[in-house]
Amino acid sequence: MIGVNHYLVLSGLLFSIGFIGVLRRKNLLMLFFATEVMLNAVNIAFAAIGSYYGDLSGQMFAFFIIAVAASEVAVGLGLLILLYKKYGSLDLDVISSMKG
Amino acid sequence: MYEFVAFYIFAIATTILFLITVMSKNVLYSMTSLAAGMVLISGLFFLLGADFLGVVQLIVYVGAVMALYAFAMMFFDATKDVKEKQQNPQLVFLLGGLMALVFVIMFSAPVIGDNIQALYPVVDGVGNAQAVGMVLFTKYLVPFEVAAVMLLVAMIAGIILAGKKMDYSLTKCEAIDEEMSVELEKGEE
């Protein structure tokens, strides 16, 4: 049988992949994909710990994370469309207006 | 044995697919591999005995979220490769690798607490969906309703942000106005 640690290590690796994506992506749509990867990794950890302790709270939290992710995508894509209409590009270097 | 093989197939395939998502230059490849990785993650949920969560993952993530991305990609040019200026790629991989190392050490260490008790234990004799329903509609009823309101707010925000003035370009509105006025003048003449 596989223990909970296998799932947690997998979750940590996937989270790191998403983290690398967030750091290296400059395109806003790709940045969204990387955040989805991170959210999915966290969901795996919640489900694994929940099943390890025989507790349903982990699954509950994963449900609420899925709900939050769905609404985040809805609002975020609306904003992306507005940004694309305004600047004609989704590149962060192009649309950055604060020169800090 | 069966669980072992399934877990490693799902784990390796998911990692490779998500690496493609993060590294690919093409938006279409990136999105497709993300969708495939999410399908395999639902397989992991089924392995963990969270059947309902796996189905929700399939319906909401693979069905709704990826369809939303696919529709949104009609607004952006998806066939062109994304050009990204990398300022310091080595640093990114160093940070990501360090983070992965820390996570792996943290999670593989045998530090799981013994004094943790299940707050809402899995009920015996009923299926996963039934057990989830019993907890969700008793203990987590208020967060459930708040999540419903949040989804409503997100829906309205999406409609307001993306849906308004679909036939009206926000950047080219002045040019269109000028064209309109020129046409009107021509009509008057």
Image (spheres, coloured by chain):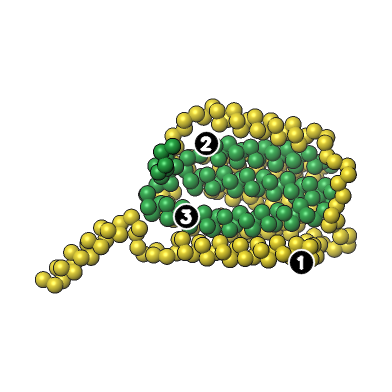
Q: Residues within 10 Å of mark 1 (few under 14, many from 20)?
A: few
Q: Nearer the viewer, residue A55 or A2?
A: A55
Q: Colour of chain A?
A: green
Element marked by disc 1: loop
In the image, B127 versus A90, the foreground residue is A90
Q: CA distance from mark 3 to mark 2?
A: 21 Å
Residues at discs 3 and 1 in contact (Cβ within 8 Å): no
Q: Which residue is mark 2?
A: A24
**Observer-nearest of B92 and B61:** B92
Both labels 3 and 2 in a single chain: yes
As measured in the structure, the alpha-carbon distance from the residue carrying label 3 to the one carrying label 1 is 33 Å
Q: Is residue B160 left or right of residue B139?
A: left
Chain B, which colour?
Answer: yellow
Q: In the figure, A17 relative to B155: above or below?
A: above
Tell which circle, 3 or 2, labels the residue nearer the N-terminal end: 2
Q: Please, what secondary structure does the residue beneath circle 3 have?
A: helix
Label 2 lies in what chain? A
Amino acid type shown at disc 2 = Arg
Which residue sits at x=82%, y=53%? A55
Q: Residue at x 81, y 50 (%)?
A: A51
Check whether the beta carbons of the residues at disc 1 and disc 2 lie within 8 A of each other.
no
Residue drawn at (54%, 27%) of the image: B90
